[in-house]
Structures are given as C-alpha cells and as structure tokens.
Amino acid sequence: MAHTLPNLGYNHDALEPHIDAQTMEIHHSKHHNTYVVKLNEAIAGTELEGKSLLELVEGLGSLPADKQGPVRNHGGGHFNHSLFWETLTPGGASQPSGDLLAAIESSFGSFDEFKNAFANAAATRFGSGWAWLVVKQDGTVAVTSTANQDTPLMGEAIGAEKATAILGIDVWEHAYYLNYQNRRPDYINAFWSVVNWDVVADKFAAAK
Ligand code: MN
C-alpha cells in the first residue's frame, strides 16, 4: 500500500505569526511530500510495500541493506513530519498538565528546565535535524536530538537508544528560513506558542 501525505488539520496560515503560511505550505506540500514520493519509489515492487511506516522505521536495521538508506532518509522524513504537524496547533496551551507534566517535572525538575534542555538540543543540533521529547524504554521522558531525518524509534540502527518521540521540532533550515533566516533560536522560542499539548499527552499515555 502506497504511503500518502497526511492532511495538516489546519490551514497554512493557522500558526502565524509563529510559523508563516508560506513556510507551512512549502514545508508540507513540497518537502514532506517529496519524502512520501521517494519512500514509495524506494520500496515499489518489493516486500516492503506490505509494511506500515511504523514497521519500516522501527525495523530499519533488519531491512535489506540497499533499502536501509532510502527508508532511513525518506521513511524517517515521512514519519517525523507526520508527527510534527500533529503536535502543532494554533492557540495551544502554554504547558501540559496531569501525568505528562508530572513525568517532565520528575525528569527535569521543572517545566522550565525541560524547555531549556529541549531548546538547547534544538539550537545546538549542527546542520539539519530534530530535537525531541521522548519516552524511553523505562517509561521516563528525556530530551534527545537526531541528525537529518533519523528518528529515535530507529534505535540501534542509528546508534541511539530506542525511544518513542512524542514531540519534536524540525530545525532544518527549510522549517524556518523564510521568516527567521539565521535566527534559529527565535524560531525555537516561537515554537512553544503552537504546541498541541493535548496531542503530546495522548502520545505520552500511549507510549509509556
Ligand atoms: Mn522539515
């Protein structure tokens, strides 16, 4: 079954002024779509067509050697962006509550300390990649960062501890350059205004 580009669930201009409409349109309809198209091309006519996106990403290390590169890049890109759009919303809450807030406070001391750790991971990711809030195998939450389109669920195949991302920020320049140019920290700061903590909390409950 071919992979398809998911709908955003909101308009391109819904996240303004934090993320501008043109960036959203190009990012979703061009960048993300290209990952979907190239993933489909890479697995066309192979047994991998029968696997879900989750199975491909989680099982990266056991795929045929010639498919690991394309799935890592384009499958990872499709997976990461699908999560990204889902966890954004106009007018989101300023912070989580309930079990997720408790888990964050347990791991980081406070919600502000978590924000500092996440923002630092995003700001210091050299080149292109992502910063993440993940649920580790032991059920605790942590901040991590990956290069390019790697995703924490790939685990050993990318030399990382396997974990489930529940929130991520895309720090590829295509995610912010039109509006923020080289000011990545300003984009990271604006990101907090559009996080959908309800969705992140649901993902936390499902992952732990
Ligand atoms: Mn992107």
Image (tube, rainbow, N blue to C red):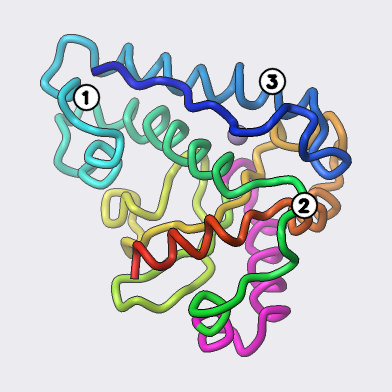
Mark positioned earlier in the residue sequence (3 or 2): 3
Residue 84 position, x and y percent, is 56, 43
Image marks 3 and 2: residues in contact by CB distance under 8 Å: no
Real-space Cα separation, disc 3 to disc 2, in angstroms: 22 Å
Q: How many marks?
A: 3
119 displayed left or right of 103: right
Mark positioned earlier in the residue sequence (3 or 1): 3
Q: Secondary structure at mark 3?
A: helix
Q: Nearer the viewer, residue 143 or 105?
A: 105
Real-space Cα separation, disc 3 to disc 1, in angstroms: 30 Å
Residue 36 position, x and y percent, is 43, 21
Figure check: 23 above or below 166 = above
Where residue 118 sits, quadrant-wise, is bottom right
Specify the label residue 91 is tagged with.
2
Residue 109 position, x and y percent, is 62, 90
Q: Is residue 104 magenta?
A: yes
Specify the label residue 26 is tagged with.
3
Q: Quadrant of the C terminus?
A: bottom left
Query: What kind of residue is marked 2?
Result: Gly
Nearer to us of marks 1 and 2 is 2
Q: Residue at the location (65% across, 26% down)?
A: 27
Q: Nearer the viewer, residue 142 or 147?
A: 142
Quarter for ligand 1?
top right
Q: Residue at the location (34% across, 21% down)?
A: 3
Real-space Cα separation, disc 1 to disc 2, in angstroms: 44 Å
The stretch in magenta equals 103-129
Specify the label residue 66 is tagged with.
1
63 displayed left or right of 13: left
Query: What kind of residue is marked 3?
Result: Ile
Query: What kind of residue is marked 1?
Result: Asp
